[in-house]
Amino acid sequence: MTHRRHALSFIAATSLLAMTPSWVNAQAKPLKILVGYPAGGAVDVVARQVAEEMRVLGYNAIVENKTGAAGQLATEAMLAAPADGSTVVLMPGGNATIFPHVYPNLRYSMADLKPLASVCSFTFALGVGPGTPAKTLKEFVDWAKANPGKASYGTPGAGTAMHFMGVMFGRLAGIDFQHVPYRGGAAAMTDILGGNIPALATTLPNLVTHHKSGKLRILAFSGDQPLPGLPGVSTFKQLGYPDLQISEVFGLFASSKTPAPIVAELEKAMLSAAKSPRLVAAIEKLEFDSSVLNSADLSRQLKADFERWGPVIKATGYTADK
């Protein structure tokens, strides 16, 4: 009788588990993809393309913009939701690898996040505007040394990879390179095109159109090899700055408490979505790299990036308040 009771209990528990679809099938509930940035921006556009492909795969996927605190509010909202795979966040990798080093009151850590897949990657570039005479990176370094206090660079925001790339470049080049943070890339672009700041560090895609039109000049970018579409533009590595080979991803994340079967299901679906021809075309239209990483490879890259940025940021003494 005891064995029979145990067997019946096991069957009942198994039946109850089978009746709990959120633990068995991530498609059983709507899939909410949170974005910490405004509608119409690059992260939002990518998220909506991902949602569309996930719907093709049978998911009831929706995008919700939860802006604020440099994207942190969306991550916090994802972690506050049930850890059943029904809520994920799409965000730049730096929100996981850089933010823990710069925000003393950050409410999450790398350990709280489960990387599912990356959707694309991108590099950064240093450009100069019409108010700067330098046409090459060497000429810019020479100009900065000959004009102390004049070399500064704008970025879309403090505490970003672009901010710290500029810090690293200034130190490696031996120049006084002052950071000028903006609230987003649009204002920074307006100022460099108007000659109000000499240089701008931002994502490479943000500079390509203006570089091709001659409104500004890309001096170098942080990729690992030259690009056919940008003849004459070298990588920092080619120009003697191998430490400035830097890239970042747009990644999809769930809570680290999400059950492994659901993580595996979401990873498989998201990799399929990220490799779809429609999504690849949308990514390339934004001039991002449509490379994709699975959960394990993305986790390894983020861990390496986290460890890489720690000493750099610590050396600057920079911290940000939320």
Image (tube, helix red, strand yellow):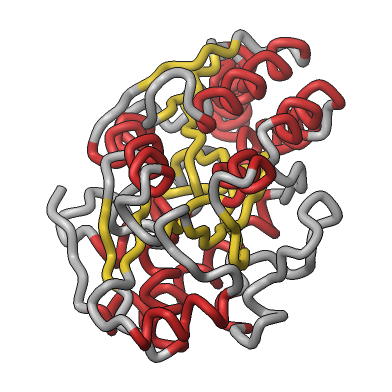
Does 114 sit left or right of 224 as displayed? left
Q: Residue at x 47, y 82 (%)?
A: 141
Q: Residue at x 27, y 46 (%)?
A: 182
Does 310 sit left or right of 222 as displayed? left
Spot occupied by residue 88 in the image (x, y as percentages of width and height): 49, 30
Q: Exactly how many numbered labels are in the figure?
A: 0
Can residue 25 be seen by looking at this rendering? no
Q: Is residue 178 above or below residue 100?
A: below
Q: Residue at x 70, y 39 (%)?
A: 287
Spot occupied by residue 63 in the image (x, y as percentages of width and height): 49, 16
Does 246 sit left or right of 145 as displayed? right
* Image quadrant in which the N terminus is located: top right
Decide which of 202, 13 is in the foreground and name it: 202
Q: Is residue 136 above or below residue 31?
A: below
Q: Is residue 311 above or below residue 57?
A: below
Decide which of 242, 187 is in the foreground and name it: 187
Q: Residue at x 22, y 58 (%)?
A: 103
Spot occupied by residue 288 in the image (x, y as percentages of width and height): 68, 42
Spot occupied by residue 238 in the image (x, y as percentages of width and height): 72, 80
Decide which of 160, 137 is in the foreground and name it: 137
Residue 143 position by quadrant: bottom left
Decide which of 127, 106 is in the foreground and name it: 127
Can residue 92 be seen by looking at this rendering? yes
